[in-house]
Image: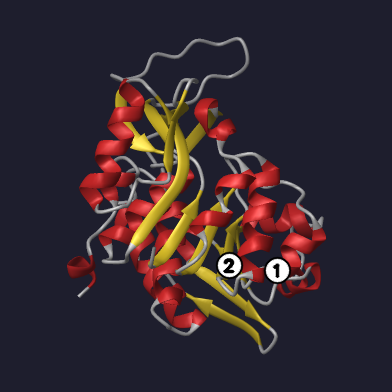
């Protein structure tokens, strides 16, 4: 199977509630109506790439339930290949999301079926892939195997290290691009004000640090390149990082220089935060023209 972008990651139903403020410990706060939307870092990344015209496949798992069908319908509707998405005997993953009026969100994930994404499923999917993108809502051994096996097969590798976790040095050394936000970079480097260039000392050939409304920083052996974001009015930041990851992988798969791929990814993420939800907010390629 020839695939520009192979995504190894999660598929979740997003249960989203708007609220004026998040509850403190032991407190109850009333919110708006619950909206059920397709999400999950893997599925989001795949849909974002497909909306930009990439040939994309998702390797993941969902349950045999309404949430699973919602996700498969959304993926197929965006043009994502779902032949590598297993239907398993566990409930589909769910993300419980609160969104405040400034567009910021807080998320609790129940992985469910995502825990069944196994390392053994990766190898058969690699032939013909151009870029592999992995993220961290699936078992860590699967992520580590996917990255190292892809690198050994000559497939370019991107790891969206979110939620941030300790991964093997061999996995980091196999990365073409380590993608993290500012908080994840600080956790990896052990200091809030650490130089992003220090990420390369962990092993990857390059890194990208997203900075929300301030854009992103590209880290290579040649130095740092700052990429600003367009100014927009955010209404919901859910899934913006995944939109960025999908656009970044698409650019790399098409042969763009890393900084150029990041410039497009910043624009895609900026558009996504002006709309509600994750996958429903992702722009088509025509909207970037």
**Would residue 27 be found to the left or right of residue 273 on screen?**
right
- 232 shown above or below 63: below
Q: Which residue is mark 1?
A: 174
Q: Is residue 108 above or below residue 289?
A: above
Task: Find numbered disc 2 in the image and state the secondary structure of the residue it sits on.
Answer: strand
Q: How far apart are the alpha carbons under marks 2 and 1?
A: 7 Å
Q: Nearer the viewer, residue 185 or 30?
A: 185
Q: Which residue is mark 2?
A: 157
* Contact, mark 2 vs mark 1 (Cβ under 8 Å): yes
Q: Is residue 275 positioned above or below 253 on the image?
A: above
Q: Quadrant of the C terminus?
A: bottom left
Q: Quadrant of the N terminus?
A: bottom left
Give the residue furthest to the bottom: 222
Q: Quadrant of residue 267?
A: bottom left
Q: Provide residue 133's location: percent of width, then percent of height.
A: 52, 59
Q: Is residue 270 visible?
A: no
- Classed neighbour count for the residue bearing mark 1: other residues with Cα under 10 Å, few (<14), some (14–19), many (≥20): many
244 displayed left or right of 280? right
Q: Is residue 130 above or below residue 236?
A: below
Q: Percent x, y for residue 155?
A: 55, 71
């Amino acid at each position: 199977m020839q695939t520009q972008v192979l995504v190894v990651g999660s598929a979740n139903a997003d249960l989203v509630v708007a609220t004026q403020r998040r509850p403190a410990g032991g407190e109850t706060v009333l919110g708006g109506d619950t909206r059920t939307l397709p999400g999950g870092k893997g599925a989001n990344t795949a849909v974002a790439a497909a909306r930009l015209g990439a040939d994309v496949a998702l390797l993941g798992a969902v349950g045999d339930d309404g949430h699973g069908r919602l996700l498969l319908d959304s993926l197929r509707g965006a043009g994502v290949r779902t032949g590598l998405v297993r239907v398993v005997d566990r409930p589909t993953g769910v993300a419980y999301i609160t969104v405040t009026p400034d567009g910021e969100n807080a998320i609790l994930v129940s992985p469910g079926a995502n825990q069944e994404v196994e390392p053994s499923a990766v190898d058969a999917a690699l032939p013909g892939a151009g870029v592999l993108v992995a993220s961290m809502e699936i078992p860590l051994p699967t992520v580590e195997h996917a990255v190292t096996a892809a690198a050994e097969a000559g497939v370019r590798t991107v790891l969206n290290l979110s939620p941030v976790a300790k991964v093997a040095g061999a996995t980091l050394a196999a990365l073409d691009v380590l993608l993290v936000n500012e908080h994840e970079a600080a956790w990896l480097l052990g200091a809030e004000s650490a130089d992003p260039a220090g990420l390369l000392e962990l092993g990857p050939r390059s890194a990208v640090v997203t900075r929300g409304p301030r854009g992103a920083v590209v880290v290579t052996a040649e130095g740092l390149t700052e990429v600003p974001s367009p100014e927009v009015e955010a209404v919901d930041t859910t899934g913006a990082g995944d939109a960025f990851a999908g656009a970044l992988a698409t650019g790399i798969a098409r042969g763009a220089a890393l900084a150029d791929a990041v410039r497009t990814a910043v624009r895609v993420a900026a558009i996504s935060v002006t709309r509600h939800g994750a996958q429903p907010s992702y722009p088509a390629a025509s909207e970037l023209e």
